[in-house]
């Protein structure tokens, strides 16, 4: 066997040293960017109550925090592990029920447990059930796992009506969070104190789930999602990886349930039924499956739809269904995926070429949406009021639905907007093609 000469060995060492140095530089830059991102997240959590200080706004912020933890825990299954679950609300609800029972024990029996510990106690209860259920449900992935999760969710929803002692029947179980011991002088009687606790736990759990995604186990979960046969060939057991990810997801879902019990002081059958499982699926999918920030965006958006939009229209669920349908058809990677599509153009310095086509497209899109929303709202108004009245007052303007002009105006907006979108799409496609064309190699 021939030995390489010294010059070749030195050259190879220099190249390897340069590569290692480059990796270290990239890791250093990434670490500072990561710290800046989490620092910004902490500032947002701390600054939101100063911008929206009303009790209703604080309640909505608390609901957003609960939804963020719940959605991130579900993303550990679907986004990172590729496990589609239709019963993830079981661990959310069980954690909430256990937390509310402990809250009652603290208030009635004097258990020396501080209120900030209750979410983590609920998380341990969710972890316990995740260990039991995951021991057989994670043997297979895909359709088998999805059907098992659906059956488990329906089973627990039925048990919540049967075992009244623990689940409280249809009325659920209520408690009083202010009866426990104070923490640094705070008794959590006000919503702003509850928000402070929620924000701290949201930040802590989000950081822990992000760190989990960066561990070898989190990387293996991604590999099992993409190619379980290859992972098994490398010497790892895909079932064990799925089981550990499942348990971690159940733990954080139980924490979200404990936060719900603290915020609303009541937990019912609705917290663990199929509707809640479908809700968290919508949050993750609309926000962006597989992206860590995707569930956060989805949780914030859908919470606003549920709490704010529902006060302005009775058919907000219809708009939610349309949003989900459009996401599945045209943006399967969710809102975060749409944003990340622009990353190559931004890195190439050609993102500004997309600004003008987007601005041109805004007006026809808004016209189409206004026309469609007007038609849906008028149809709903006619259907809801029947023959009693044809008057409708959106935003304080009286509209007679028996007249022709409101319907004609809505249809005209849809037609004109659709025509404008059709005319703008060619220029947008051309701008996209220019933004993504590879740079000339000198």
Image (cartoon, grey):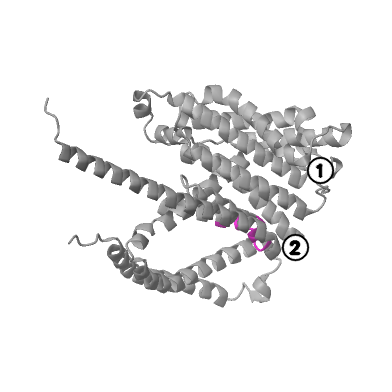
Q: Earlier in the sequence, mark 1 or mark 2?
A: 2
Determine the residue located farthest toward the left in the rendered image: 2
Would you say the residues marked 1 and 2 are in contact, meaning their CB atoms lie under 8 Å apart? no
User: Residue at the spot x=29%, y=60% of the render?
Assistant: 436
Q: Is residue 380 found left or right of 100 in the rendered image?
A: left
Q: Position of residue 76 (x, y in %)?
A: 52, 38
Left or right of 106? Residue 316 is left
**Does residue 105 appear anywhere in the picture?**
yes
Find the residue positioned furthest to the front: 6
Write down the residue under mark 1: 177
Q: Residue at x 72, y 57 (%)?
A: 58
**Residue 322 inside the magenta-drawn segment:** no
**Is 347 placed above or below 85 here?**
below
Residue drawn at x 44%, y 72% is: 364
Q: Main secondary structure of the magenta part?
A: helix
Measured in 3D between alpha carbons, the distance from the residue under mark 1 to the one under mark 2, in whole angstroms, is 21 Å
In the displayed structure, 343 sits above or below 171; it is below
Residue 308 lies in the magenta stretch:
yes
| Residue 59 % position (x, y) | 72, 55
Q: Describe the element under mark 1 as helix, strand or loop.
A: helix
Residue 229 is situated, as x and y percent measured from the top left of the image, at 35, 27
Q: Which numbered circle lies on residue 335?
A: none
Picture residue at 42% right of the left edge, 73% below the top: 359
Local packing at callout 1 (Cα closer than 10 Å; few below 14, some 14-19, many 20+) is many
Position in image of residue 266 (x %, y %): 77, 42
Q: Is residue 280 above or below residue 401?
A: above
Badge 2 element: loop
Q: Indicate left or right for 80 with 235 as reference.
A: right
222 or 78, which lies in front? 222
Quarter holding the C terminus?
Answer: bottom left
Query: Which segment is the magenta one?
Result: 307-319
Checking the image for residue 54, the label placed there is 2
């Amino acid at each position: 066997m021939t030995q390489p000469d010294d010059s070749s060995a030195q050259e190879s060492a220099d190249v390897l040293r340069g590569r290692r140095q480059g990796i270290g530089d990239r890791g250093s830059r990434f670490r500072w960017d990561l710290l800046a991102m989490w620092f910004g997240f902490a500032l947002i959590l701390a600054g939101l109550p100063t911008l929206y200080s009303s009790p209703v706004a604080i309640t909505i912020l608390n609901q957003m925090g609960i939804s963020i933890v719940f959605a991130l825990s579900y993303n550990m299954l679907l986004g990172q592990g590729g496990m589609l679950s239709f019963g993830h609300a079981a661990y959310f609800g069980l954690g909430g029920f256990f937390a509310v029972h402990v809250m009652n024990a603290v208030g009635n029996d004097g258990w020396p447990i501080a209120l900030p510990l209750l979410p983590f106690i609920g998380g341990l209860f969710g972890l316990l059930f995740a260990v039991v259920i995951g021991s057989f449900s994670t043997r297979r992935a895909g359709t088998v796992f999805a059907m098992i999760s659906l059956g488990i969710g329906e089973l627990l929803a039925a048990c919540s009506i049967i075992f009244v002692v623990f689940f409280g029947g249809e009325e659920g179980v209520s408690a009083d969070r202010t009866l426990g011991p104070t923490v640094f002088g705070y008794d959590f009687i006000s919503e702003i104190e509850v928000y402070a606790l929620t924000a701290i736990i949201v930040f802590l759990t989000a950081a822990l789930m992000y760190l989990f995604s960066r561990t070898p186990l989190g990387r293996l979960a991604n590999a099992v999602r993409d190619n379980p046969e290859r992972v098994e060939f490398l010497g790892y057991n895909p079932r064990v990886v799925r089981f550990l990810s499942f348990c971690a997801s159940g733990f954080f879902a139980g924490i979200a349930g404990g936060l719900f019990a603290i915020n609303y002081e009541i937990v019912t059958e609705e917290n663990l039924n199929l509707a809640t499982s479908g809700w968290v699926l919508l949050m993750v999918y609309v926000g962006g499956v597989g992206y860590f920030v995707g569930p956060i965006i989805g949780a914030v958006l859908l919470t606003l739809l549920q709490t704010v939009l529902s006060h302005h229209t009775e058919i907000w669920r219809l708009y939610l269904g349309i949003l989900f349908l459009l996401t599945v058809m045209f943006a399967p990677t969710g809102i975060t995926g749409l944003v990340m599509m622009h990353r190559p153009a931004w890195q190439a310095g050609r993102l500004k070429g997309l600004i003008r086509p987007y601005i041109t497209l805004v007006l026809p899109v808004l016209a189409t949406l206004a026309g469609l929303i007007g038609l849906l709202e008028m149809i709903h108004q006619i259907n809801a009021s029947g023959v009693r009245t044809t008057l409708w007052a959106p935003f304080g303007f009286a509209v007679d639905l028996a007249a022709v002009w409101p319907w004609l105006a809505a249809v005209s907006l849809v037609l004109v907007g659709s025509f404008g979108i059709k005319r703008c799409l060619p220029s947008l496609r051309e701008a996209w093609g220019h933004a993504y064309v590879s740079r000339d190699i000198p």
